Amino acid sequence: MRLMNYNDLSGKSVLLLGKTRALQSDEFDALLRVHNVTRVSVYDSTVALIIEGRMMNPYEQSEAEHLYETQDAPIVELSEIERWLCQSIEPNRLLMSLKLSRNQERLVDFLQNPYITNELYFKLLALYDWQNEGLFDTDTNRDVTASIIGRFYKELERNHNVQYAMSGLAHLIERYGTTELIDAIACLEPIAKVLRDRSNRSLSGVLDAIALHPQTSEVILRKLIEERATLLAHREPLSLEEELLALKSEEINTILAQNKTLSQQGTDSLERDFPQLIAANAIMSEERFERLIEAYGEYLASNQSCSISMQQRLFALGEEAIIESLAANPKTHEEILEVIFESGKHRVALGSNSSLSPEKLEILYASQEYKVLEALAANTATPIYLLYQLSLDRRFERSVKTNPAFGKHIQTHNIGWH
């Protein structure tokens, strides 16, 4: 394929063999005229570029082969010229034309065009009339929904069926959601309708994904707070904290007390009713630590935000339950872990600690204790060769297969696993 500057085509003609793809034929010709380029159907001396389109008939395929051999005019793929032409689209003019004509068929064609900008795509999407039907209820609605997933789902070639399933839209939000994309999806009439009519459960998976995504705007989250407060309480970083606390729900507050991004003010308000959860999860201040250490040392010892001096004070108490929690805490200081390890106790807790060195994990493996091996099978820090060994034991096979570190290793090395 010969590279060329398409702007040099001004005043010349091009020959298209086959049909257009991203652009309808009349749109294609109109954009060529913007560049003072004419499309012809037969090769002549004015042709400066030959374009291989889609669905060439046998005559056109034969003509393409002949031109390859006999003519000097460059031959390019359709995608290259359509991409260039789409850069010439004037967004405001197109939007005004579509608003005035209300030509939904033309609008859908543009929504399926991969070469327009995302900015223009979102503006066009807002113009689409869903005819009071669901996202997949009509062929055209299905095509528009599929265009959203197809445009933003980055690994579509590996799972193209995701375009035509409601779960695909939820998965798109989970994996590739941005504030702009989520706002656009939430404003789609079928989804906006469900947000207004909370008795409709048809889009629950999509709404759950929106509620949990960290990029969802607070404007959208407020529309979800009544039906999805439990999910919103799980969000990290936490949003709408005041509104969630104002619900005065024991269930919601239990979740909030475990949220590591709960503000100090929110933590203060929940400490009296949920001291154990606050001790284990809150970002720990010196003042709060002093209040909780006497009665809740075991929970403080599992808190990953405790400073070294706090951990040393907890360790000095010498209580077995506290030391057990310190042994399992991946943020426990190395010197404290060393002392616990050398004691020969708390091996199960140590086996679950992802900050323990491979050498120490190997020593724990050598014990062949069932509970220790069970902990090692789920530990993301356990050396891969040990995980392979553990996977051969039916007792630990499931834990190994669900271990994220092992799964990543399998994917990275492209190993089949059944």
Image (spheres, rainbow, N blue to C red):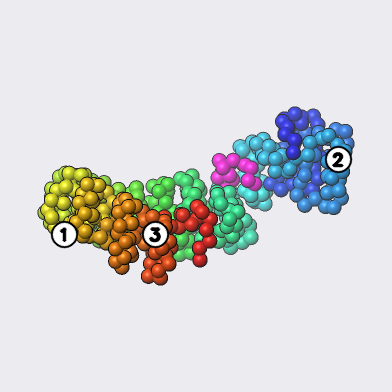
- Residue occupying the point 83% across, 34% down: 72
Mark 3 is on which residue type? Leu
Displayed quadrant of residue 379: bottom left
- How many numbered marks appear? 3
Q: Mark on residue 69?
A: 2
Q: Position of residue 391 (x, y in %)?
A: 42, 65
Q: Using the rendered image of the protein, determine whether residue 313 is visible from the camera's viewpoint.
A: yes
Mark 1 is on which residue type? Glu
Q: Using the rendered image of the protein, determine whether residue 242 is visible from the camera's viewpoint.
A: no
In the picture, measured across the screen, residue 404 lies left or right of residue 288, that is right
Task: Pick the quarter of the image with the N terminus.
Answer: top right
Q: Which of 33 and 4 is in front in this view?
A: 4
Residue that numbered label 3 is attached to: 386
Q: Position of residue 320 (x, y in %)?
A: 16, 59
Q: Nearer the viewer, residue 411 or 169?
A: 411
How packed mark 1 is, by other alpha carbons closer than 10 Å (few <14, some 14-19, many 20 or more), is: few
In the picture, measured across the screen, residue 317 lies left or right of residue 403, that is left
Badge 2 vs badge 3, beta-carbon distance below 8 Å: no
Identify the secondary structure beneath mark 3. Answer: helix
Provide the major secondary structure of the magenta segment. helix
Distance from Cα at disc 1 to Cα at disc 3: 29 Å
- Work out whether mark 1 precedes mark 3 in sequence or the reverse, and give the earlier one: 1
Distance from Cα at disc 1 to Cα at disc 2: 85 Å
Residue range of the region highlighted in magenta in the rendering: 113-125
Residue that numbered label 1 is attached to: 320
Mark 2 is on which residue type? Glu
